[in-house]
Image (spheres, helix red, strand yellow):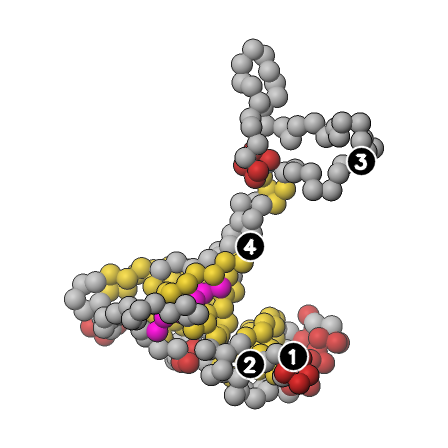
Amino acid sequence: MKSIIGRKMGMTEVFAKDGTMYPVTVIEVLPNVVIQKKTIEKDGYEALQVGYEDIEAKRLSKPELGIFEKAGVSPKENLIELQGDEIYAKNVGEEINVDIFASGEVVDVIGTTKGHGYVGTIKRYHHHIGPKAHGSGYHRGVGSFANNGRDNNRVIPGKKMSGHWRPHQATILNLTVVEVNAEKNYMLIKGAVPGPKKSLVVVRSAALTQFGKPVVKELVSHEEKGE
């Protein structure tokens, strides 16, 4: 098992030499720098805390800067824990690069979905809409807040009301790596992954591997395209 942090940059398409078209998601994968190693003796589990993307020191507090000074690395904007036997051998200060994956591998991608924004109870909880005829002016309201005479001076916790709906973590299983470019720090993954553009994602080895790996045919190079 192995995993790495990347940033979703958008979607495009690539073509194999036989004309097969792959819709792919472009994920920028800058070097993941190991900041701390979690051990079973001290923390109860094994993991690597890695930093992603440099940030100016003046934007961090002194306690935050102390984390990076202890590891002997430049300040990072994002700190995320990764797990995997193949990457746990890395020591503090070392980098995890995109070339730990290869074309044809099956991976899972974890990201945060876009969500629906601020919505009402009819969309959020499937409440019934009010009558639309005979002069009724009540259509999409939240309904009465009364509690049958009990605790009418407050709103009971758990009351279904309008609000921000459904940005949550999602994992897309068994996607295929189409291309890995270690020089330009990106990878192409067949299909869509969760989250908006520029959002962080975690790419890991497939937890529930399918029978047999999907076949990825040889792509047309940029030289052959004349680019």
Question: Which amino acid type corresponds to the residue marked 2 in the rendered image?
Answer: Val
Q: Could you classify mark 4 by the number of other residues whose Cα lies within 10 Å: few (under 14), some (14-19), or many (20 or more)?
A: few
User: In the rendered image, which residue does mark 2 sit on?
Assistant: 33
Would residue 20 be found to the left or right of residue 141 on screen? left
Provide the residue span drawn in magenta: 105-110
Q: Could you classify mark 3 by the number of other residues whose Cα lies within 10 Å: few (under 14), some (14-19), or many (20 or more)?
A: few
Question: Which amino acid type corresponds to the residue marked 3 in the rendered image?
Answer: Arg
Question: Which amino acid type corresponds to the residue marked 1 in the rendered image?
Answer: Gly
Position in image of residue 209 (x %, y %): 37, 69
Residue 197 visible to the viewer: no
Residue in the picture at 22% in, 67% down: 16
Q: In this view, does 227 lie above or below 69?
A: above
Would residue 157 be found to the left or right of residue 92 on screen? right
**Magenta segment includes 181:** no
Going by the picture, which residue comes out furthest to the left?
A: 18
User: In the rendered image, which residue does mark 1 sit on?
Assistant: 44
Choose between 8 and 203: the one closer to the eye.
Answer: 203
Position in image of residue 12 (x %, y %): 34, 60
Residue 49 visible to the viewer: yes
**Magenta segment includes 108:** yes
Q: Name the disc covering residue 160, or none.
A: none
User: In the rendered image, which residue does mark 4 sit on?
Assistant: 168
Q: Is residue 211 above or below residue 196?
A: below
Asked if disc 1 and disc 3 are in contact, CB closer than 8 Å, the reply is no
In space, the residues marked 1 and 3 are separated at their CA atoms by: 43 Å
| Position of the C terminus by quadrant | bottom left
